[in-house]
Amino acid sequence: DSYLKGEEAVRIWEVDRVGQPIRVLEQKKYLPGNNLHLTIDARLQDAAEKAIRDHLAWAQSQTNPNINKAKAGSVVIMDPRNGDVLAMVSYPEFDPNLFVGNISSKAFNELKSNPLNPFSNRVTRGQFMPGSIFKPITVIAALEEGLVTTNKHFYCTGVVRVGNSQLRCNPPHEKQNIIEGLKNSCNTVMAELAFSVGPEKLASYAKLLGLGIKTGLNLEPEELQGLVGDPDWKRTMRHEVWYPMETALIAIGQSFVNVTPIQLAQVYSVIANGGNVYQPQLVKKITTASGETIKEFSPKVLRKIKLKQETLEVIREGLGKVVSEGTARYSFQGFPLKQIPVAGKTGTAENKGKNDYAFFASYAPADQPELVVVVVVEEGGFGSQAAAPIARKIYEEYFEVKPQSSVTVKSISPTMAEKTGDSKQEQFAE
């Protein structure tokens, strides 16, 4: 408001004892406010709003109880080359024009009492366990620490046992390397990597990439910080010991991990651009009403991460195969991946007392990234079924790809999604 609000016209009169004006003592003309030039791309913003709105309407019309409770979600689109936020959707939404005049008490109370809280910006203040979209961080940590190469193979039997606890991976993936483990979203591979890295270093890499700390986006109300827990955190904050199974759970984005969509966009931007952690920005410049530039906002690199070339190659190949061959393949069936390769990761996270939350974090074109798209559908079920199709619609709009009428959200059955490897743990800890 300090930039946008102008100065009101003022006229001060001298009056006589009966209140009649005599002369003008002081006069100020109206000065218009300044203009904010946003990074938001109107076409992408519209596409994102329509995509999530249409999907939620479809989900609520279904008889499947695992998906028909989906009523809220968020989308954030970022340019990984500079940190510009190109679209930001928090659903359900409200019309801010209601507050221009005098909003009725009834309308205001309806918004305020809505349990889905339309006043909250889910992109910056929605905190969720991310599920499998955390897994690239686990792979990055292991590669950077020199603990694994693509020549090492893992064997997935479908169950990881730690003490009296077990973590399931369905279906069993048998023999695979880390690229295949990422493609298949294999919990066994991630658990073994996490045990090698250790929870402290795993949390450290997550924070380095952008989780558990604020992104720096200057927007009110202030963004939430999120959480990446480790043994020291648990001992200090909860006065409890760290269980070995919790290391495996952190590696697959469960347990003591809470993230915001804007943080996920920042992390996947780092993967897309090769190591630059950009501060997300919503404003390009500020100009006067006459067009004079008062202030420009240049891209801001918060830190540069020197990732090994091998690390980037492995992660990017794995994320590319997620879309072309793995857990998101049904959502992108018919999409021209050879011309416009997409890299991404699906995620399905448990939430006590609610249906699973669906995630998809991605970037495209995979070989020269221009967009990072993160989608969250609350109580949407599988990420491959609920979140990835929304991202696809956004990419179709941006790259001007004609939608494939034969490939819709409805074509992705729960049976297919259950085979993606976005699996869940049976027990939280010992």
Image (spheres, rainbow, N blue to C red):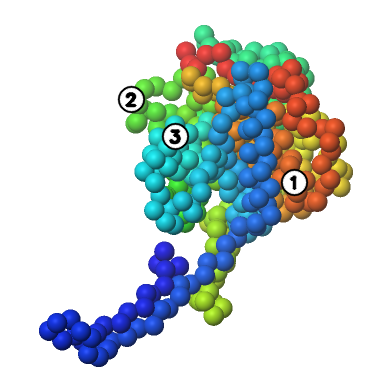
Q: Amino acid at mark 1?
A: Tyr
Q: Residue at x 42, y 42 (%)?
A: 107
Q: Which residue is mark 3?
A: 114
Using the image as rendered, state which of residue 78 and residue 29 is in the foreground: 29
Q: Quadrant of residue 12?
A: bottom left
Which is nearer the N-term, disc 1 or disc 2?
Answer: 2
Q: Which residue is mark 2?
A: 239
Q: Which mark is residue 395?
A: 1
Q: Quadrant of the N terminus?
A: bottom left
Q: Residue at x 62, y 19 (%)?
A: 66
Residue 418 lies, with reference to residue 129, above or below; the image says above
Residue 177, percent across and down? 75, 27
Residue 347 lies, with reference to residue 220, above or below; the image says above
Secondary element at image label 3: loop
Secondary element at image label 1: helix
Q: Residue at x 41, y 79 (%)?
A: 30
Give the Cα distance between marks 1 and 2: 46 Å
